[in-house]
Amino acid sequence: MSDIVQLKENGVPKYLKTHADAIDGVNGKLVRATGNETILGTKNFQDGIQVAGKKPVLTKATTDYAMVDRHNNASVMSDGSLKLYRRGDLVYLTGSFKLSAGKYNQGVWFDIPSWSYPIESVRIYGKSGDKVCLLFINLVDNNNIVCVDNIAKDSWITASACWMARNPY
């Protein structure tokens, strides 16, 4: 073990003679391993941070995004789109789309991205003309979004919803 050097100021010893005590004895200069204290300034933890063994919400400023429209789902949509966003543990669905075929208990978005899977089944109340319509995320059938109600071809459906993601970041 290396020698312990005692720091002095004007010939007066300033710190105790052990490494641990010397480090711990610098009040207001170092963060202590135990005890409560206030730390000023912005700190950038490059490798992440945990609280009680878990990552806090929004430690990653990541927004996942997916969209379905007539270009990638022409059998369902002839116009408009549905979009999914994820920020932290929350997933947002929003959109307005025109059906290219009538729907009754059939999918409108197949195989939604796994990052958007909800912790439980989600009911999404949309609007089609003067009618309220129900969309449902079916967890058993490849996580599809299903139009439960009978909606005619060329009808517009507008919907939005928010839910907790199954897998936290």
Image: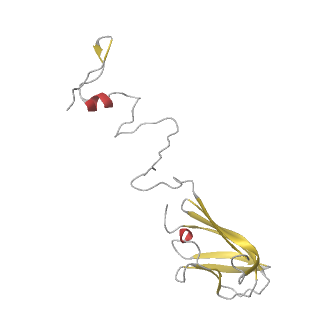
Q: Quadrant of residue 58?
A: bottom right
Residue 104 falls left or right of residue 61: right
Return the x and y of residue 119 as percentages of the image width and height: 51, 71
Q: Which is nearer the eye, 45 or 146?
A: 45
Residue 110 falls left or right of residue 55: right
Return the x and y of residue 111 as percentages of the image width and height: 58, 78
- What color scheme is it? secondary structure
Q: Residue at x 79, y 79 (%)?
A: 130
Furthest toward the top, the residue is 10
Image quadrant holding the N terminus, namely: top left
Return the x and y of residue 84 as percentages of the image width and height: 64, 68
Return the x and y of residue 37 as percentages of the image width and height: 42, 37
Q: Quadrant of residue 131?
A: bottom right
Q: Residue at x 24, y 28 (%)?
A: 18
Q: How many marks?
A: 0
Q: Quadrant of residue 132?
A: bottom right
Residue 6's place in the image compared with 39, above or below, is above
Q: Residue at x 39, y 53 (%)?
A: 52
Q: Residue at x 76, y 84 (%)?
A: 100
